[in-house]
Image (cartoon, rainbow, N blue to C red):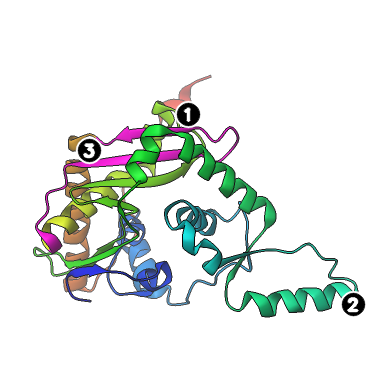
Amino acid sequence: MKNGVYNISIEDYHAGEGFSRSKLIHFNKSPLHFYHEAYGNAKKQKLVDIVKKANPLEFGNALHTYVLERDSFFDRYIPMIKVNRTTTAGKEAYKAFLDKADGKQIICEDALMELQAMGESIESHVEAKALISDAEYEKSLFWTDPDTGILCKVRPDIWHNNFICDLKTTASGSFRDFQKSVYTYSYHIQAGMIQEALKHVLGVEMDNFIFVAVEKEAPYAVAVYRLDPLAVGLGVTKFKNILLGIKECQETNNWPSYPSEWIGVPTWATSN
């Protein structure tokens, strides 16, 4: 892939060359874990047969499509029908349903209802609705890092020229809980990568990175948080350090696992 902005599907984005945040952060566990994820885990991930709320990746993708690309949602997804597949009539009805699906991803009724409720909650949140409106959605940016020569990729959810909004589902949208999620799941690294992508692909300086977080349980509360520029800067630093580590491993063909260390007595082990 050459440096640029591509209008491709989420499936083509994941299958394409380059490292995304979800791949890169395995390096924080160990170079070996990254190598396995990036190079050793060659088996293509199989889509789930039916999207359910218990499938976080597929459910999140469905929510993004429902909220950001509503007009194409039913081009990609088809609601599951209720039939008794133990009966002859039910088997025939289900076969006819699969023929009608014709490659669309099946989504269970409960998951669809949850998506619709979450979408309505976002629509009713004035600030979130304004941030999502009149933007570019789900564009894919590929670029070669100039310091390491490593191809990277990002896929901003909501793009307004020089600021980005990121749609996240969360168990809790409270400030403290979501702040913890930002660093637990390396969302700041994602922000740093997008800042780098905009700069190197388009020469655009990212002014703001804003989260639109929606809770996954009723009442599906929505929260809007701006990521501090210092956090974005830390994300860039972490991202660049990971790339430098990968480059060193590539050059030495050495992908170590955990380092050898002394294990001391943790504080919790001595408490009553």
Badge nearest the viewer, 1 or 3? 3
147 left or right, relative to 138:
left
- x, y percentage for residue 14? 38, 69
Residue under numbered circle 3: 231
- x, y percentage for residue 184? 38, 42
Crowding near the residue tagged with mark 2, few <14, some 14–19, many ≥20 C-alpha atoms within 10 Å: few
The kind of residue tagged 3 is Ala
Q: Which mark is residue 88?
A: 2
CA separation, marks 1 and 3? 33 Å
CA separation, marks 2 and 3? 59 Å
Determine the secondary structure under disc 2. Answer: helix
**Residue displayed at 68% across by 55% down:** 109
Residue under numbered circle 1: 269
Between 124 and 246, the one nearer to me in the picture: 124
Badge nearest the viewer, 2 or 3? 2
In the image, the segment drawn in magenta is: 201-227
